[in-house]
Image: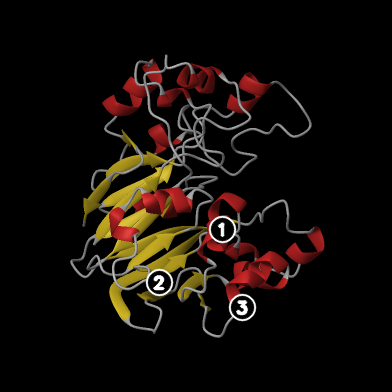
Amino acid sequence: MRVKILGSAAGGGFPQWNCACPNCRALRAGAFQGKARTQAQVAVSQEERSWFLLGASPDLRGQIEATPELQPRDGVRQSPIAGAVLANGDLDHVLGLLLLRELQPLRVNATASIHRILTEDNSMFGMLHRVANQVSWADFAPGASFPLCGRAGEDSGLRCRALSLATHYPAYVSTKRQSALVPGEASLGIVIDSPSGKRLAYMPAVPQIDDALLKELDSSDVLLFDGTFWSDDELIRTQGRGPTVQTARQMGHVPVSSAKGSLSRLAGLRRPRKIYLHINNTNPMLNEAGPEYRQVREAGWEIAEDGWQFDL
């Protein structure tokens, strides 16, 4: 299985368009020892002919143009992108589907709740159903293993399983609608097994780390883990207190630092290659000259960059 990291930042990318935090200011000024990043996006393939997206980033068009393997190769209208797996309904995870609306057949795997939110509650996503068989939906339940299949149902050889991580749906989903949805289908981690027996764990939004999750993560060969915030009060310190400013945990992200943070809680994982992904523009570990970056690297972690790839 080939894995490509097309984007590695949290929602808004780095720098974020409306942010003048120290990181964003320094990057724009050319004085930052670190790299710009687009919004988190991962693609996987077993034989490099058909690719499957994990989520659909708002930056997807530019990410495709930066990745020759995802560009048309046969005929005037064609794409090697065969399908997608949705871990949640967050805008920075699903808006990219609308960029794939040019009548190209696509198979989208999602929980029944996310499927309903996107197709029943949002008229814009009707653009994915202008012609017959434009997009086919395959619903799955957390915990159940299912094959990643192409547009015509052909089995790629990759198998997927979703872990229920949180029960909070995006803010655009009304309270009334949420009451009719399954809480455990709101936010997921994705585990993909290749025919070689190797396993990828993609966990872009993790609100807490318990023993059951630790056991799951320790069975993976590569772990792409939630690196959104360095500290729980990161946004409060960079933006000040306000009615819309929340802590990392309130937003559904365990911070990297502190005794209960991911760097400490996942220190005992020995099997997987550990990579932080979905990194917010305010996170100081983006600064490759800073102590936070050194602490992460000395602990055996890597910090994902756009364009990385590896084989499992």
Rounded to the nearest whole Å, what is the CA distance between mark 1 and mark 3? 18 Å
Would you name the residue on which mark 1 appears? 94
Residue 297 marker: none
Which label sits in the foreground, 1 or 2?
2
Q: How is the image coloured?
A: secondary structure
Q: Earlier in the sequence, mark 1 or mark 2?
A: 2
Q: Position of residue 223 (x, y in %)?
A: 33, 48
**Residue drawn where x is 47% and y is 61% of the image:** 163
Instruction: Report the amino acid beneath label 3.
Output: Arg
Instruction: Report the amino acid beneath label 1.
Output: Val
Query: In the figure, 2 relative to 104: above or below?
Result: above
Q: Secondary structure at mark 2?
A: loop
Would you name the residue on which mark 3 appears? 130
**Residue drawn where x is 37% and y is 71% of the image:** 76
Query: In the figure, 138 relative to 191: above or below?
Result: below
Local packing at callout 2 (Cα closer than 10 Å; few below 14, some 14-19, many 20+) is few
Residue 11: image quadrant is top right
Would you name the residue on which mark 2 appears? 77
Instruction: Report the amino acid beneath label 2.
Output: Arg
- Callout 1–callout 3 Cβ contact below 8 Å: no
How many numbered circles does the render carry?
A: 3
